[in-house]
Amino acid sequence: MTGGEVRGLADEWSSLGDRPLALPDLRPDQPCPISTGRLAVPSQPQIFGGGGFWFGEGPVFLGLYYRAADETQAVFRLDAIPRSGNGHRAKTGWAIDPSYSGPILIRGRALDLAGTPLVFSASGRPPEPALHLKAPNVSPATLWSFWPSSMWVPAHGCYGVQLDTLSTTDVVVFEAT
């Protein structure tokens, strides 16, 4: 990448970061509005978990690897996930439709009144409250992009993840039991 391309990408991520989190706030008596998965991501060799249930409307999809494979709801048990630092380090995957190329910003938090932020890490980077990915312009146009990552979930509860691209904002809600 040239200096101009790096600056341009930084500006695009900055504009995505300027978008407010559009996650619901839950009162203590409200149920978690759990997202339902769908068979949106094809089985391709580079995608761990491709062909199974993924969460989101696209072009970015979240794979939650600690839930039962046949479970369509975004629910998983924390006791199966190793604790690391201030949370449970849940392996997650991000699959991106080949029709999209450009920056992706991923952020999340607990949906209760405390709003504890989630932290993410990919490609050996330290955990941060935002995950920055860039979907390449792929060829052939049928090849999906995939990033394995970790998401630190602090405790049992209801959480939201916002997936921002240049043209879309999507929200996935999951429950850690």
Image (cartoon, grey):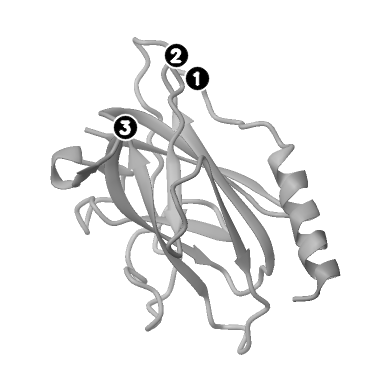
**Can you tell which quarter of the image residue 110 is in?**
top left
Q: Which amino acid, by three-letter code, is at mark 2?
A: Leu
Which residue, given by chain and number where applicable, does mark 1 sit on? 25
- Compared with 130, 1 (above or below) is below
Distance CA(mark 2)–CA(mark 3): 15 Å
Horizontal and vertical percent position of residue 146: 47, 70
Label 2 crowd (10 A; few <14 / some 14-19 / many >=20): few
Residue corresponding to mark 3: 154
Give the structural element (helix, strand or loop) at label 3. Answer: loop
Position of the N terminus, as image quadrant, is: bottom right
The residue singled out by tag 2 in the image is: 113
> Is disc 2 in contact with disc 1, using a CB cutoff of under 8 Å?
yes
Tell which residue pokes out farthest to the left in this image: 79
Figure check: 104 above or below 1: above
**CA gap, disc 1 and disc 3:** 17 Å
The earlier-in-sequence mark between 2 and 1 is 1
> Sequence order check: which comes first, mark 1 or mark 3?
1
Q: Return the residue found at the far bottom.
A: 140
> Which amino acid, mark 3?
Pro
